[in-house]
Image: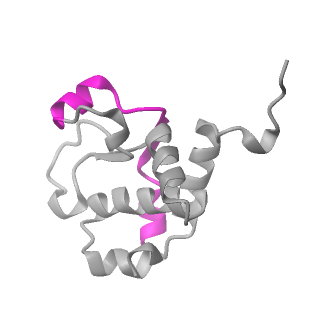
Amino acid sequence: MTQIAPAAIAPDLAQIEQIAHEAVVALPEPYRAAATQIILRIEDFAPEDVLEAMDLHDPFELTGLYDGIPLTEKSVMDQQTQPDVIWLFRRPILDEWADRGNVSLQEMVTHVMVHELAHHFGWTDEDIAQIDQWWE
């Protein structure tokens, strides 16, 4: 039986989640506190109904998803029916990371996380560039 070296094992869901939480901790205030209120879900792939709703035929096309109402569209008068959620999809993230070959896994996960947070906060590309050096 061939043994696989631990370094050759792909990061699991918990490791991706840990990196995503580290990305939130690294955010500048006031974003850090607000970002901790968003539920984080890590799955291997997006659910079929999500892919269908987005008219995506390949589950590797979607690395992350923000599911909620952006802060720029919320009102104190609104009755919130569900919490804001950021989904990260492990297998597409790992696939893109391997394809790129020029960024660390930490950079890749942080980039996807910041991109999804941008939907929540209503950030512009300039706002993103101040937080995620990937854009430079």
52 vs 36, nearest the viewer: 52
Q: Quadrant of residue 13?
A: top right
At 49% from the left edge and 59% from the top edge, which residue is drawn? 100
- For the C terminus, the quadrant is bottom left
**Residue 79 vs residue 64, the one in the foreground:** 64
Q: Residue at x 23, y 36 (%)?
A: 81
Quadrant in which the N terminus appears = top right
Residue at point 64%, 44% (across, down):
15
Residue 66 visible in the current orientation: yes
**Image quarter of residue 67:** top left
Residue farthest toward the front in the current orientation of the protein: 2
Query: On screen, 51 above or below 38?
Result: above
Query: x and y percent of residue 66 in the render?
Result: 31, 48
Q: Nearer the viewer, residue 103 or 78?
A: 103
Region in magenta: 30-55
For this orientation, the residue located farthest to the top is: 1
- Report whether residue 41 is seen: no
Asked whether, in this view, residue 117 is left or right of residue 111, the answer is left
Q: Is residue 82 left or right of residue 4?
A: left
Could you tell me which residue is drawn at 59 percent across and 56 percent down? 105
Residue 49 in magenta stretch? yes
- Tell me how the rendering is colored: one colour
x and y percentages locating residue 10 in the rendered image: 65, 39
**Vertical side of 51 occupied by 112: above or below:** below
Residue 96 at x, y = what percent? 45, 51
In percent of width and height, residue 71 lies at 24, 60
In reply to whether residue 37 is colored magenta, the answer given is yes
